[in-house]
Amino acid sequence: MQYRLNKYIAQSGICSRRDADELIMSGQVQVNGKTITELGFKVGSKDKVFVNKQLIYPKKHEYYRFYKPTGYITTSDDEKGRKTIYDIIPKELHELKPVGRLDKNSSGLIIMTNDGDLINALTHPSVKVPKIYIVSVDGKINQEHIRKMASGIEIEPKKTACAEVTVLESTSTSTMMQITLYQGLNRQIRKMFEYLGFKVKSLKRVQHATITIGDLKRGEIKPIKPLQIRELKKYLEKLAQNG
């Protein structure tokens, strides 16, 4: 069986097919000792493929749901010595990569996979993939605050953040909301509330596209069922077509 070279590279888990094309065009890929720059080049199971002189192999794609607790950062290594999600995740799953990030003080769902194409589809800015959070803040949120978040808040120079907000519970001293984002800006929710004069007490992601946190417990990681992955990919294809 033969594969297009970019697909073969993507199935090794090092990047998406889009990024594999860039590696090929920049002369960083060799097949059987020969540098290949042709995007449509095909390889078979007996061919030896190198990226930057490192031999790679296609791997079976794996998909997991992970419930990140607060206090951990979403990376495989940290120069400051902070705790990372890989301190919790079993060693045999350390080749999996997180789809997007959650900051240290946030918790909730992270999709973990070695499928570079899926990571790209879920995070590419051209496709508005919804992510849903449950957020609590100090103080009472009113309709004007909700309107401002929907219309857009400039959280950084030339960076405008938007969010759909539904109030779940509200008192004179605190508000709990469901917030849906279609962007992937750094610390977007916290910066929006900071602009409005509110402090976030808790922030938990409960859904990314069609994948939900479900019955996961803090720190737990479980495989995503094949049917759910098929549904997710169909959903992302429709989003890309409509976008």
Image (cartoon, helix red, strand yellow):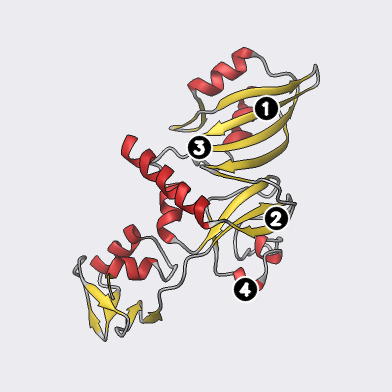
Q: Which residue is mark 2?
A: 72
Judge left or right: residue 173 versus residue 242: right
User: Residue at point 32% right, 81% down?
Assistant: 45
Q: Nearer the viewer, mark 3 or mark 2?
A: 3
Q: Nearer the viewer, mark 1 or mark 2?
A: 1
Q: Which residue is mark 1?
A: 177
User: Residue at point 34% right, 70% down?
Assistant: 8
Alpha-carbon span between mark 4 and mark 2: 19 Å
The quarter of the picture where residue 26 lies is bottom left
Q: Nearer the viewer, mark 4 or mark 2?
A: 4
Q: Which residue is mark 3?
A: 130
- Mark identifier at residue 92: 4
Give the mark, 3 or 4, whose residue is nearer the N terminus.
Answer: 4
Element type where label 2 sits in the image: loop
Alpha-carbon span between mark 4 and mark 1: 37 Å
Specify few, some or many for label 2: CA neighbours under 10 Å numbering under 14, 14-19, or 20 or more.
Answer: many
Q: Identify the amino acid type marked 2.
A: Tyr
Residue 167: image location, x then y, percent: 67, 22
Judge left or right: residue 116 versus residue 186: left
